[in-house]
Image (cartoon, rainbow, N blue to C red):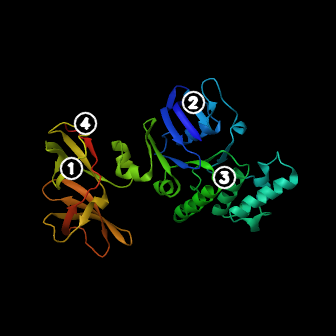
Amino acid sequence: MLTLEHLSLAYGTIEVLKQVDLQLETGEIGCILGPSGCGKTTLLQAIAGFHPAQSGRILIDRVCVNDTQTNLAPDARGVGVVFQDFALFPHMSVLKNVEYGLHKLPKAQRTQVATEHLLLVGLEDYLHVYPHELSGGQQQRAAIARAVAPKPRLLLLDEPFSSLDPQLRERVAVDVRALIKRLGITSLLVTHDQNEAFAMADKIGIFAEHKCQQWDSAYALYHQPSTRFVANFIGESTFISGEVMHQDQWYVNTQLGRLALTHSHNFVENQRVDVLVRPDDILHQDSSPLKATVTDRRFRGAHILYRLNLPNFNEEVLCLAPSHHNHQIGESFGIRLSIEHVICFASDNN
């Protein structure tokens, strides 16, 4: 439904994105995730028709809507947009706001379709109230109803949960995902919040340094990051040093033990590498001879996230342990390394 081919975007001579390629299948929900200033919103604006491509192409439902020769107007692209501030008309009732995008339909049909979509988002009791009388979550649902009522081929959402209280965001994101999936609308979300991305998206693109670093599922981004930036950006992680060896098979020698490599990853023997270690790769094990010392701890209810210093190695790892293992800063406990996905990057110290 959405294809970006070698898409580059700029503001005058200032490069924003370079050679972006990605695909979103019909009915999928995608997410553009990255730090502030990485070009997320500019990309969404380009897809919507508000920003021209410098080079490359944008295709919606296999039709080119933007390249260096073509730039279809926003209302000709079959795209619905939910803006960061919802952009509801304050002088119109909720019903009139949703009817606004249905102006091509007869009046009676406009009201019927708008009412049906407000029912879908649970606002059937608020048809005749005004936006300022709604809570933030209700305003967001009204904005989504307005965007999807014209049955767009593609729905774009620009930081749609940013104005909500943090404790509400993930729950609302799950509800919105269920609604979009029920309607079968292909959607693309922009956010800087990983929890929102994980709750909403089938595919996530990590953007930084003017490019898409990786376009993949949340599982692959966490367990199989393709770049050091993705490894650092997604979830929580540390790196420990290792040395690539080959003896019947490729493996990495680390202070925490030998780790088998499924292939050489283009490394050479004796090459120094940094091994990605996630908090769930370090297991709390009282009987282990390897002890680590707590330098920091964060209580998370069912678990405690420990930052641990490895003795004699001047390296640290994170350990997510059940909270009944309650250790204080300065205490030591036994750990064991258990990595199912060994991810290495060439060390800067090579």
Q: Is residue 20 visible?
A: yes
Q: How many marks?
A: 4
Extreme residue in the right direction: 107
Instruction: Assign a secondary structure to mark 3.
Output: loop
Is 14 rendered above or below residue 133? above
Give the spatial CA distance, label 4 vs label 2.
33 Å
Q: Closer to us: mark 1 or mark 3?
A: 1
User: Residue at (16%, 67%) from the top-left corner?
Assistant: 288
Give the spatial CA distance, label 3 vs label 4.
48 Å
Q: Residue 78, image x and y in percent?
A: 69, 41
7 or 3, nearer to the observer: 3
- Which residue position holds label 2? 57
Left or right: 256 with respect to 218? left
Give the spatial CA distance, label 3 vs label 2.
28 Å
Q: Residue 50, image x and y in percent?
A: 65, 36
Residue 285 image-quadrant placement: bottom left
Is 55 rendered above or below residue 197? above
User: Residue at (65%, 55%) from the top-left corner?
Assistant: 183
Q: Which mark is residue 266?
A: 4
For label 3, the crowd category at 10 Å Cα-Cα, with few meaning under 14, some 14 to 19 and many 20 or more, is many
User: Residue at (60%, 48%) from the top-left corner?
Assistant: 186
Cβ atoms at labels 3 and 4 below 8 Å apart:
no
Is 345 rendered above or below residue 7? below
Q: Which mark is residue 156?
A: none
Amino acid type indicated by mark 1 = Ala
Left or right: 42 with respect to 224? right
